[in-house]
Image (cartoon, grey):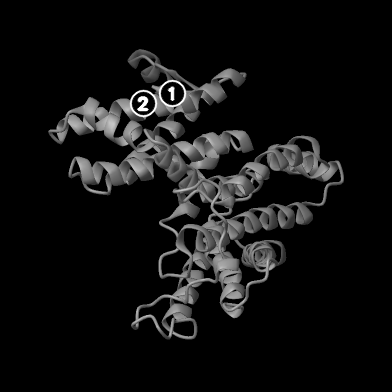
Amino acid sequence: MRLELRGQVSERMVYCSPVFAVIMTFLTGMLIFSFLGVNPTQAIITFFVEPVSSIDGVAELCVKATPLVLIAIGLSFCFRANIWNIGAEGQLTIGALAGGGLGLLFFNSSSQFLMPGMLIFGILGGMVWAGIPAFLKIKFGTNEILTSLMLTYIALLILSYLIHGPWKDPEGQNFPESRLFPEAGLLPIILDETRLHLGWIITLICVPVAWILMTYHLIGFQIRVMGMAPMASNFAGFRGKNIIWISFLISGGLAGLAGTIEVSGPIGQIIPVISPGYGFTAIIVAFLGRLHPIGCLLSGLLMALTYLGGDNAQIELNLPNAVTGVFQGMLLFFLLASDVLVRYRIQIIGYKNKHRNVE
């Protein structure tokens, strides 16, 4: 048995394979639930249906999906250019610190410009942090996977230092957290009696903007050409260094924006754990969405549902919260398996043919 490269990849199967991966994840999940002694049908309903059975649940789904979609769209630009930015979690953290730091600096302010300023600072913070692996890759040829990933842990250490030190709330009973942001530094709620905030509208605006940039703008064309055929990109006169910079800055900017939205939206202050791993989960979201902004929106909603479903299953079925990671891992596994079968066919080699080839 061996894998043989297909002569032509079916475009229909490329976009149908994520659906197949989702279906296989559901079926395998039901099998796992049955092994745990839980009714699989009831478990699937508890995990995927009950969390969005009310307006409040749908609003919470959008709140969870906001950072995932934003980060995944940014990562799509890098991945399409064949640049592996794995440090979106660190860029989210620095963006949250940059935007949140402005809110703390003017914690007595009631200016209407504070919130836009925080969002801009968050974008700039993420861009600066993403610019480090871009500079190292261009200047010294370092591997961006390692540098971007290692910078994530540096960002988390900076966060820990600030909230245990200079930014700790002096009236916070010695808890490692910052002051609460002023009213002007909080994203307005757009649906009464829920946590759904303006960040969701910003995300919905980013989706078509990214789609136009990626599909119709010269920058998006250069990114796609560099990712598919670097030699053709060089022959056409595209500057690879500029494309690396642009891809990293777009990715880091959107991750930083997601970080600021998190601290100024559902959290309302800076705390030790800003993200439960959105920067890493967004990698799955990007590939599940086929590196397309609209696909990232849909896959981001699905991935956000796994977070809500994991919490609900923990409460209703007494299952460990790790079930969320299990579903996300299975989804990634089946997606990768589907991609392999889309690009390769399985060829069965008989024993005699194999023996003859050896001879």
Q: Is residue 206 left or right of residue 328?
A: right
x 44%, y 40%: residue: 303
**Split into 4 quadrants, where in the image is the C terminus?**
top left
User: 340 above or below 355?
Assistant: below
Residue type marked 2? Met
User: 89 above or below 233?
Assistant: below
- Name the spot of residue 321 as percent of width and height, x first: 27, 49
The answer to whether residue 211 shows anywhere in this view is yes
Find residue 307 and report its image quarter.
top left
x 48%, y 28%: residue: 18
Q: Nearer the viewer, residue 242 or 254?
A: 254
Per the image, the residue denoted by label 2 is 24
Tag 2 near tag 1, CB within 8 Å: yes
Q: Is residue 43 left or right of residue 297?
A: left
**Split into 4 quadrants, where in the image is the N terminus?**
top left
Mark number, residue 298? none
Identity of the residue furthest to the front in this view: 192
- Name the spot of residue 306 as percent of width and height, x first: 37, 41
The answer to whether residue 10 shows anywhere in this view is no
Around disc 2, counting alpha carbons within 10 Å, would you say few (fewer than 14), some (14 to 19), or many (20 or more)? some
Mark number, residue 20? 1
Residue type marked 1? Phe
Identity of the residue furthest to the left in this view: 37
Question: Alpha carbon of mark 2 to alpha carbon of mark 1: how far?
Answer: 6 Å
Mark 2 falls on what kind of element? helix
Identity of the residue furthest to the right in this view: 237
Q: Nearer the viewer, residue 221 or 170?
A: 170
Mark 1 falls on what kind of element? helix
x 71%, y 62%: residue: 138
- Name the spot of residue 196 as percent of width and height, x first: 50, 48
